Image: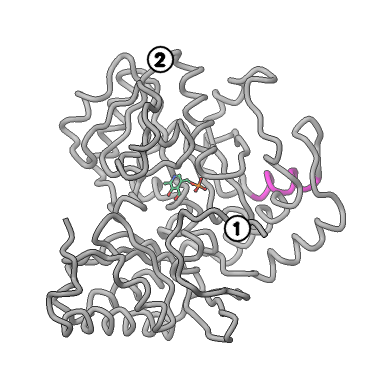
Amino acid sequence: MARIARYYREYGIRLVRGYLQYVWDDSGRRYVDCNTNHGVAFLGHANPKIVEAVKRQVEELWVAPLNFYTPARERFIEEFSRLLPAGFGVVFLQNTGTEAVEVAVKIAKKVTRRPTIVAFTNSFHGRTMGSLSITWNEKYRKAFEPLYPHVRFGKFNVPHEVDKVVGEDTCCVVVEPIQGEGGVNPATPEFLKALREEATRKGALLIIDEVQTGFGRTGAVWAFQRYGVEPDIFTAGKPVAGGLPIGLAVAREEFGDVFEPGEHGSTFAGNAVVMAAAAAASRLLREEDVPAKAEAMGAELAKALQSINSRLAVRVKGAGLMLGLELRVKADQFIRPLLERGVLALTAGVNTLRFLPPYMITREDVEVVAAAVEQVLRAAEAAGGSPLATAT
Ligand SMILES: Cc1ncc(COP(=O)(O)O)c(C=O)c1O
C-alpha cells in the first residue's frame, strides 16, 4: 500500500467525527477545536444548514464548467453579494487561498502591466510559486528559490517607509489585515492607510488577503472593514464554503473583464457542490449574525487568555476569534500537551499559540481552553528551564 507523503508533524491521533465546535478521535475522546483545519471550520464541523444544502446538491449536479450557468452558482452569487461592501462587484472563483492570491496578482499585472509585487515581513500568502514568492518566511521559501524575482518586502507596520517600497514599477501591494501564520499580528490603521494612499499615488493596486481573516472571524465580515480602508481586490478562502475547498478574489467592478477567454481558468472552480455549500454558508453568516457572535465570544476568549497566570504568557493579540497568545518561549512544544487536555490549537510565528475556534464556541469551551493552556504553561514552568527551548 502506498502512503501519504509526510510533510506535516503527526500527532498520532485519528479524528473520526466533527460536529460544530468539537471533534472526536477513534477512542471517543472529544476535543474543543481551536485549529479548525487552519481556520476552515469557522462555521462549525458538519453545520446542519450546510450539510443539508450539500446533500441536496449532490443528488442534482456536481460539476459544470464556467461556460454554463447553474442554479448553484446563481444562489451563491446572490447570497455572497449581500456580504460585499458597495463597489465590489466581481468575484473570481478558485479552489484554495493560494489560488485566490494568484488570480488577484494576475489581475494587477494585467491591469498595470508592471512587474513588481510589494509584500511585507512575516507575510504568508500561500505555497504555489507565485504566492510563495510574496511569503516572507525563509523556512517556506528557501528550498524552492529562485522564485518570482520582482518582489520587494517592506517592513510590516512601518508606515513611514511605505513610500520607499511602493514605486512606479509596482503592480500591487499585498497585505494581510491581521497576519495569521506570521504571528497573529494586526496591521495598524496608520499602516493600512499609508498603503492605500501610496498605492493610489503610484498607480498600483492594493490587494488585501482575507483568506484567514475574512468571512466574519475578526468580528466584521471582512477585516478591512474594521479599518475603514478599502482595497482594489481582496481574497477569501478557508471558511467560505463551510469546509469544502474554495478560494476567491473579489474585485472592484472595473476589473471584471480584465481576462480574455483562455487567459485564466481552473477546472474545479465554481463546481456546483462547493457553490451550494458556499451559498448556505453565506446565508448562515448573515442570518445568524456570525461576525457579532465572533466579536462577543472573541472578547470572552481574549479575557480568559489574558487572565492566565503564568510568567511564560506575554500578551494576547488579534481580533474576534482570531487570537494569539504570545509566549516567552517557543509555542510548538505546547500543541501536544494541549491535545492531551482535549484542545486543538495552532502556532503562529515562533512563539505564539493561535486559536481559531468556530463561532459557536461557548463560555464553557472557553473555560476548558484557558484552563488547559494555563495547565500546560504551568507544567512547563514547574519542569524548570530544561524543556523550554527559548524562542529566537
Ligand atoms: C493569509 C493567507 N493567505 C493565503 C493562504 C493560503 O491558503 P490555502 O492554504 O488555502 O492555499 C493562507 C493559508 O493559511 C493564509 O493564511
Q: What residue is pinned by disc 2?
A: 114
What is the residue that sits farthest to the right in this orientation? 60
Q: Quadrant of residue 271?
A: top right
Name the residue type under label 1. Arg
User: Is residue 77 covered in magenta?
Assistant: yes
Q: What residue is pinned by disc 1?
A: 3
Q: Is mark 2 within 8 Å of ligand 1?
A: no
Looking at marks 1 and 2 on the same chain, the residue that comes earlier in the sequence is marked by 1
How packed is label 1: few (under 14 Cα within 10 Å), some, or many (20 or more)? few
Q: Position of residue 295 (x, y in %)?
A: 40, 66
Name the residue type under label 2. Arg
Q: Quadrant of residue 305?
A: bottom left
In the displayed structure, would residue 307 be above or below residue 6?
Answer: below
Measured in 3D between alpha carbons, the distance from the residue under mark 1 to the one under mark 2, in whole angstroms, is 44 Å
Q: Position of residue 375 (x, y in %)?
A: 27, 84
Helix, strand or loop: magenta stretch? helix
User: Is residue 259 covered in magenta?
Assistant: no
